[in-house]
Image (spheres, helix red, strand yellow):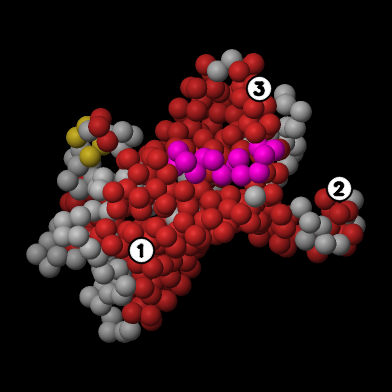
Amino acid sequence: MTAHPPPRSARRPELDALRALVVVGLVFFHSSLVFETDGDFYVRNAETTELTTIFAALCVIWAMPLLFLVSGLGAWHSLRRRGAGGFALERLRRLGVPLVFATLVLLPFPQWLRLRADPAYHDSYARFWPHFFEVRLEPSEFPFILQGASYETGHLWFVVLLLVYSLLLAGLARRVPPGLGRRIRDGLGWAARRRGMVLLPAAPVALVSALLGVEEDYGGWSRWAYLLFFLSGFALAADARLREAMRRDAVVAAVLGIALAGAGTPLFLIAGETPGADPFMDLSPLATTARILYGAAGWCWLVAILGLLDRRRHTPATEEATQEATGEATGEAAERDGRPRRMYDYLAGAVLPVYILHQPVVVGVAYVVVGWRAPVAVKFAVIVVASLALTFAAYDVLVRRTPVTRFLFGMR
């Protein structure tokens, strides 16, 4: 092991809180797509607004990349604890089983509602369901090799990518000699001592974004950029010096991230004004430059978010905080922390099931609400509140209370 291994029992509750924040935020994000002017969401309101585009832009630059990076951090600890074979089996159970179940049970529903928006379409859900699975193989779209007229991975593209990346990582781990792995970790830890080195992964992310484009169907990033975020998270977990470097350079990363995003956004808008242009995929100098800035900004935002949150956690403000950190909290403090801890555990366990459940619920609620005569703000608020309530109710009543449903949704 390196001279600076991360503590074996270290738990970072801020990472679980971020995961929960992103997943809950996706309810707001997908609800806003109902009112997007140029979007192609399953259900669309007659009246639209440009504000949703601004809201989406602020989310896509960091939200889904953060989920992949945090997943990579968790993968390092899981692989270290279980070994490559055990890690692969655990990922198949925790991700593969809910992927198959949700594809069969939940994914067809939003597509059916999209078709039902056409007054000329009258097929029942039972009649549509088998047509959803009329697929063909498209190896060039790896890992989304199943394609069809009605079939789609929907919001489960995240689960597909995370499962594939995890299995690729498990296969790679079996072939990397332990000595080489130690030397790589030592090299990364040594390099992290220099200021700014933790920002260097922005370069490959920017390069992938520039050359391969950004895919709107997958959260506004290339599927291979997500692989870089996942592997970066895996590397960051390997040595405590990398974590220290993120805390040290967090402010610089925040300034750079804001500056890069501020410079790249106008370029995206200008590139998109050309008739027939696609700033997300075109290789024109303007579009390519915009994506370079976008990719670099995304990595800087992640370093800033994780580093600044970790700074707060490593600055105990009171003697009580110090006692709790060393396991010496009083009984009164432990009792006082009982309720927040239960809420934290509840939300941490709910992340994947809520992610799987939320989009069909949002689409179902929106399908009803868009027919109302009400202002956009009212409709948006109703969709968000009703979707959150129904999603967590479904999780609490239908998922978390029985071993079978917990297994089907990837819960421990």
Residue 200 falls within the magenta-colored stretch = yes
Query: What residue appears at the point 38 percent right and 40 percent down from the top-left corner?
Result: 208
Mark 2 / mark 3, whichever is N-terminal: 3
Q: Name the residue under label 3.
A: 182
**Dot 3, crowdedness within 10 Å: few (<14), some or many (≥20)?**
some
Is disc 1 placed on a helix, strand or loop? helix
Q: Name the residue under label 1.
A: 266
User: 234 or 253: nearer the eye?
Assistant: 253
Q: Name the residue under label 2.
A: 326
Query: What residue appears at the point 53 percent right and 43 percent down from the top-left corner?
Result: 69
Pinpoint residue 60: horizontal percent, then vertical percent: 42, 56
User: 173 or 361: nearer the eye?
Assistant: 173
Residue type highlighted by circle 2: Thr
Q: What stretch is highlighted in magenta?
A: 192-205
Residue type highlighted by circle 1: Pro
From the image, which quarter does the C terminus lie in? top right
Q: In which quarter of the image is residue 145?
A: top left
From the image, which quarter does the N terminus lie in? top right
User: 191 or 96: nearer the eye?
Assistant: 191
Pinpoint residue 284: horizontal percent, then vertical percent: 25, 48
Q: Quadrant of residue 382?
A: bottom left
Q: Which residue lies furthest to the bottom in this view?
A: 374
Mark 2 / mark 1, whichever is N-terminal: 1
Residue type highlighted by circle 3: Arg
